[in-house]
Every structure is written in C-alpha cells, then in structure tokens.
Amino acid sequence: KHIQSLGLYGKVSVDRFEAIGSNIFLKGTVSYTGSVPLRSAVVFVSLRSTTGEPQSARWQELAPPPSEEGMEFSIDMPIAAGVDPAMCEYDVRALGLPLPDSSW
C-alpha cells in the first residue's frame, strides 16, 4: 500500500505497510521543503473504522527535523483484537514546530 499525505510542514510517503498479529507496521519517508527552520517535527498516524470510530494512534518524533532530502521513519501501532486492518482508514501526517525566532 502507498499512502501519501501533506501535513502542515512535511510530505509523507508510506512505502511499507504490514499487519502482523495485533500490530500494524508502517515505514516511509518524510521531507520538508519549507523556508522556516524547524525546532522539532513528528509523524502522526491515526487509525479509524470506516464509520469514523478511533481505533489506534501513534506518533514518532523526528530528530533532527527532516530536510528536503527526507528521512525515514517506522511506526508500529497496536490494534485491538477483532479489528480488521483492511476495513480501517489511515491518516498519516508530518507536523513541525518552527524555531522561536522564526517569522511565519
């Protein structure tokens, strides 16, 4: 599966998706092409049922914050027994916090 999302500051590309037992594993790349220097950045993944009910969520801090070249990330998310990953919706975002002296 390939999931792509444009977050507040980054472009996220998920290149690998696996459901193994009671976990979902995502591996991908985040890049940042903005002009404002970042103090920190995270990748946030949420999992919802097709009716919108929250199933799971995880985030991973990206240190140092990604650049144009991008950086890899991997996240594992626990899922409850009986949840079918094929019947879920995924939201993958990259978010950044600018340095305090940066002007937006």
Image: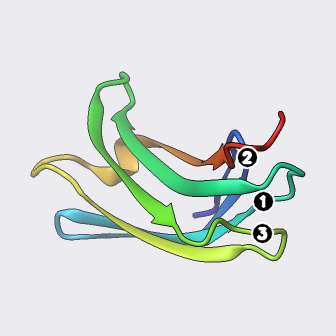
Picture quadrant of residue 7: top right
Q: Position of residue 40 (x, y in %)?
A: 58, 56
Res 2 quadrant in image = bottom right
Disc 1 + disc 2, Cβ < 8 Å:
yes
Q: Where 55 sits versus 34, above or below?
A: above
Residue found at x 18% / y 70%: 21
On the rendered structure, is 25 left or right of 36?
A: left
Are the residues tagged 1 and 3 within 8 Å (C-beta)?
A: yes
Q: Which residue is mark 2?
A: 9
Q: Return the residue found at the far top.
A: 51
Residue type for callout 2: Tyr
Tell me if mark 2 has few (under 14), some (14-19) or many (20+) residues whose alpha carbon lies within 10 angstroms of its own.
many
The tag earlier along the polypeptide, 1 or 3, is 1
Q: Is residue 17 visible?
A: no
Viewer-proximal residue among 10 and 81: 10
Q: Which residue is mark 3?
A: 67
The mark that comes first in sequence, 2 or 3, is 2
Q: What residue would you read off at disc 1?
A: 32
Q: Earlier in the sequence, mark 1 or mark 2?
A: 2
**Percent of width and height locating residue 54:** 29, 31
Image quadrant where residue 101 sits = top right
Q: Measure how far apart labels 2 and 3 are at the Cα level.
A: 11 Å
* In this view, 21 is above or below 36: below
Residue 31 is situated, as x and y percent measured from the top left of the image, at 75, 64
**Percent x, y for residue 19?**
32, 67
- Residue at 70% from the left image edge and 55% from the top image edge: 38
Residue type at mark 3 is Ser
Marks 1 and 2 sit apart, C-alpha to C-alpha, by 6 Å
Disc 3, SS: loop
Give the quadrant of the N terminus: bottom right
> Is 60 displayed left or right of 42 in the figure?
left
On screen, residue 43 versus residue 32, left or right, reads left
